[in-house]
Image: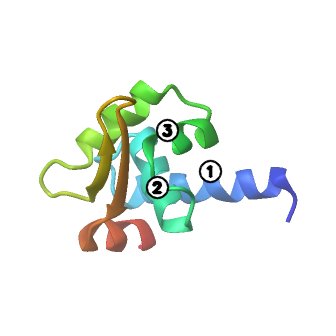
Amino acid sequence: MSEEEEIAAFLAEVDRLIARAPRLDPVQAALLTAAACGLPADSRSLSGHLGLEHALVLRAVHQLQDTPPLIRIIREDPRTMRRWFELTEQGRQIAQG
């Protein structure tokens, strides 16, 4: 699959996730999709992969920890504000439909 096709498939999955879980905004849905697809589950790497500012990704990470939590922080670096996370069971269920 070409890079262009991979990007299109990823964005299609983000759209499907938003349709299944309309409370998610596009950045939150992209984070859940990325984590479910095996992309690096840390805020700094994902911001680079998604072409987003790290602050936007951090905001989405924080929001996804709200009730019900869809991700959990497993490690953080206070100096860089990088957060490593994993999907909770509910997050996995939503991401995988």
**Residue at image point 38% right, 51% down:** 84
The reply, left or right, for residue 96 in relation to residue 62 is right
Q: At which x and y percent is residue 20?
A: 38, 61
The reply, left or right, for residue 17 in relation to residue 87 is right
Q: Is residue 34 above or below residue 79?
A: below
Q: At which x and y percent is residue 55?
A: 40, 25
Between disc 1 and disc 3, whose residue precedes?
1
Q: Secondary structure at mark 1?
A: helix
**Residue at image point 45% right, 49% down:** 42
- State the separation of the CA atoms marked 1 and 3: 20 Å
In the rendered image, which residue does mark 3 sit on? 44
| Residue reaching furthest to the right | 2
Q: Are marks 1 and 2 in contact (CB under 8 Å)?
A: no
The quarter of the picture where the C terminus appears is bottom left
Q: At which x and y percent is residue 33?
A: 49, 58
In the rendered image, which residue does mark 1 sit on? 11
Q: Nearer the viewer, mark 1 or mark 3?
A: 3
Give the number of callouts: 3
Q: Amino acid at mark 3?
A: Arg
In the rendered image, which residue does mark 2 sit on? 41
Q: Nearer the viewer, residue 26 or 85?
A: 85
